[in-house]
């Protein structure tokens, strides 16, 4: 079949995501590497620091439009890391069922640009998000998150910043080109232990 046609065929994907719950204290404001700053995400900021990454910029603007909040770490011209927050009542991220994500504050869509990895930015972004939630909600005892069970950097960052394992969501999803993810089935095994964390 032609490659141009294959691109438009929906694909089935199994996903195992480990779930974490925050049980720590309000973190101190993290120190960022010299020359980096953080700001809450806005359309104007995304346009400024993601002018060379149109698809990311549009995807993140889409999250803001759906009611998510974001933290952007940047050097004034280009983004270095970002992370988003789904407040209670908002059904994001799409790969976790609504019934699970719509109650807590959910941390999601974290990314550190390749040139800034292993410099502590994911952990800084998590701490900034926790402080941001505390400002908005006056509490941080209802914060949860997820990541792929094989995503060791992401998992380590959550453990170091005060999250504890809270089971595993196993799901089957359909990736529909130009539409996104359709969750066909998902089960949260709340007591399932996480795969061993590889150091
Ligand atoms: C996962 C990701 C956000 C981590 O960002 P980062 O800024 O490099 O992370 P940090 O420097 O804050 O490090 C976080 C932890 O991961 C560890 N780590 C980072 N990169 C690692 C790697 N390649 N291999 C092993 N461990 C790694 C760090 O040592 C740190 O562990 P510690 O807390 O035990 O000291 C980044 O790799 C990324 O953007 N990946 C692609 C997108 C993604 O997977 N996003 C997460 C989805 S929830």
Image (cartoon, rainbow, N blue to C red):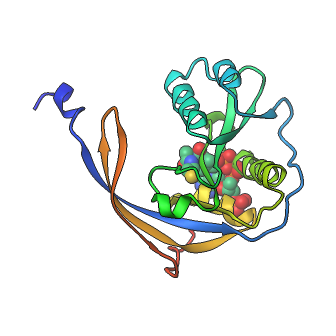
Image quadrant holding the C terminus, namely bottom right
Q: Is residue 123 left or right of residue 168?
A: right
Q: Is residue 62 left or right of residue 8?
A: right
Q: Residue at x 32, y 45 (%)?
A: 175
Q: Which residue is depicted at the point 68% across and 58% down?
A: 157
Q: Is residue 148 visible?
A: yes
Inspect this view and state whether residue 199 appears: no
Task: From the viewer's side, name the closer residue of 121 and 103.
Answer: 103
| Residue 194 picture location, percent across and down | 52, 74
| Number of numbered discs visible in the structure rendering | 0
Up/down of 42 relative to 126, above or below: above
Q: Position of residue 197 (x, y in %)?
A: 57, 70
Residue at screen point 73% across, 47% down: 125
Residue 7 sits in which quadrant? top left
Image position of 56 with respect to 17: above or below:
above
Lateral position of residue 155 relative to residue 132, left or right:
left
- Residue sitting at 79 percent across and 55 percent down? 137
Depth check: give the residue in front, 109 or 98: 98
Q: Is residue 89 above or below residue 83?
A: below
Quarter of the figure with the N terminus = top left
């Amino acid at each position: 079949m032609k490659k141009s046609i294959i691109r438009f065929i929906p694909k089935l994907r199994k996903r195992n995501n480990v779930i974490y719950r925050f049980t720590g204290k309000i973190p101190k404001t993290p120190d960022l590497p010299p020359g980096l700053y953080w700001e809450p995400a806005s359309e104007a900021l995304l346009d400024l620091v993601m002018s060379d990454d149109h698809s990311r910029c549009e995807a993140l603007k889409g999250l803001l439009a759906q009611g998510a909040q974001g933290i952007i770490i940047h050097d004034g011209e280009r983004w270095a890391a970002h992370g988003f927050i789904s407040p209670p009542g908002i059904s994001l991220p799409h790969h976790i069922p609504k019934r699970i994500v719509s109650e807590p504050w959910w941390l999601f869509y974290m990314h550190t640009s390749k040139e800034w990895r292993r410099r502590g930015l994911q952990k800084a972004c998590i701490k900034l998000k926790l402080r941001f939630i505390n400002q908005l909600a006056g509490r941080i005892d209802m914060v949860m998150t997820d990541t792929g069970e094989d995503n060791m950097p992401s998992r380590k960052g959550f453990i170091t910043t005060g999250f504890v394992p809270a089971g595993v969501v196993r799901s089957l999803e359909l990736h529909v080109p130009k539409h996104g993810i359709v969750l066909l089935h998902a089960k949260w095994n709340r007591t399932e232990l996480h795969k061993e964390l590889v150091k």
